[in-house]
Image: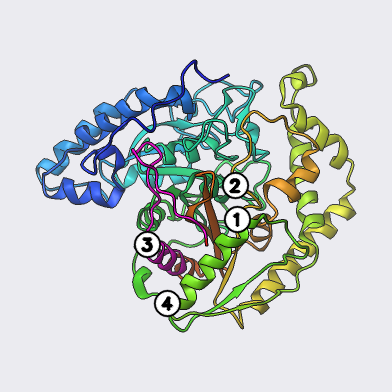
Amino acid sequence: MLPATEPPWKPRMTTPTDPALMTAEQLLSLYARRALSPVEALKAVTERIARYNPWVNAFATMNPRALREAGESEARWAVGRPVGILDGVPCTVKDLLNIAGFPTRRGSLVTDPTPATEDAPAVVGLKAAGAVIIGKTTTTEFGWKTPGDCPLHGITRNPWNPQRTPGGSSSGAGAAGAACFGPLHIGTDAGGSIRIPAAYCGLVGVKPSYGRIPQWPHGAFSAVACAGPMTRSVGDAALMMSAMARHDLRDPVCLPDDPRDWRAGMDQGVAGLRVAVVRRLGFEPPLDEEGEAALQVAAKLLAEQGAIVEEADPQLPDTRAIFSRVWGVAIARIWTGTAEEKRGQLDAGIEEVARKMGDMGAADFLGADMLRVECGHAMARFHQRYDLILTAATPTAALDADAPTIRPVEALWRDWAPWTFAFNLTRQPAIAVPIGLDEAGMPRGVQVAAALYRDDLAFRAARALETAASLPLANPAESGQMRAKLN
């Protein structure tokens, strides 16, 4: 249930000088000029969390050492010796990833509450860059679905409208980003779990090339899952990825080390690049009228900047049949890996999917994996003709936060992730970018994708859209919300 009164989004006046509303790049610039300290920034963010999180429910746990870490960062900036590119910037971590000293509960009542003993690779990268971790954000149970609720922490809500879901499975990261609970948030994405909440919440959400950001331990969805940034600007997403995308020997499938600033070249624009507007991903994903309008706006914005934009079909096999098998087997592993006496504590949808998809034979699963490889091959061929792909990000705006999960296998490709899961199968980079607000005042986004390992091109396209659309979206807590009509 919601608290007795609605959150004071509209009456609450904010100012551009509020550190909680700033991007990481803005904070770092102020730190360097001694115009703001990391402690002041953290206090602004934590005060905002205290005020708004009762309506949003974005956090699984808070970091009691955050203020001390901000103070240590402040001391480094005072002598002009920041430890890394994110020194003193507040960030959050999704509760599917380990932080040493904190339990990793994965949104579930059946997980071990014992604290983790080491950091996940992405967390290692952020800590090495000096980021201040303010807490762990909520997730759907084991990251299995899009509606943003879980048995352990209840319902997480969308700051643009608490009756709507922020999406999932990176539900807390999406809500925290939209509510300005810090500028940087780690999500994970096995079928759209970064890009869907980013689109629902008006954020930039990056699913990098598979292996670009190392992961350990690998979860049930490891064959298709990635960790990635969720931020309010493309620049912050690229900056964050620069810290996270470092080789970690624990992950046997991560890419070799490529130390770089992913912002480099981001402003080169899209002039001369060939962009395919894709409406089929082996099937015809559903899309409502305002989602279609957002897609057309994005295509027009890219064309106006000199891109060569045309509709095209990559001729993929039916990605529904492939991904539902990969997803279904992973969920069946969760079900069978849970002690029988504890299974009643799992989200009911997990049992439904496990019973429907869990009896798949080895030959069927290997056949699905071969079709996944064929998808990757088809996309590689497609990218010989096109530099970039533009699609919708979600079939609708954010769904009802309180609606029950019904027929999840059908919901996967109809309501949740029909526009996103194909790019997990092909393992190529894809970024959700906000375009504006619909008639109900909810964010709508699109998705840009590039060939495998061409994350740089995906960032260029995302930046071009951000610049042309005058993003980021207005903060939902600002008086007089922006109403960028999609026309």
What's the residue type where badge 4 is placed?
Gln
Residue 363, horizontal then vertical, whole percent: 89, 55
Alpha carbons under labels 4 and 3: distance apart = 30 Å
Picture quadrant where residue 359 is located: top right
Tell me the mark number nearer the camera, choosing from 3 and 2: 2
Q: Is residue 478 magenta?
A: yes
Q: Residue at x 30, y 48 (%)?
A: 24
Residue 279, horizontal then vertical, whole percent: 69, 67
Disc 1: which residue? 290
Alpha carbons under labels 3 and 1: distance apart = 40 Å
Q: Between 467 and 127, which is closer to the camera in this rendering?
A: 467
Q: Which mark is residue 305?
A: 4
Q: Please say whether residue 394 is visible from this viewpoint.
A: yes
Alpha carbons under labels 1 and 2: distance apart = 8 Å
What's the residue type where badge 2 is placed?
Ala
Residue 72, horizontal then vertical, whole percent: 20, 34
Q: Is residue 295 magenta?
A: no
Q: Earlier in the sequence, mark 1 or mark 2?
A: 1
Tell me the mark number nearer the camera, choosing from 4 and 1: 1
Disc 2: which residue? 397
What's the residue type where badge 1 is placed?
Glu
Q: Between 253 and 487, which is closer to the camera in this rendering?
A: 487
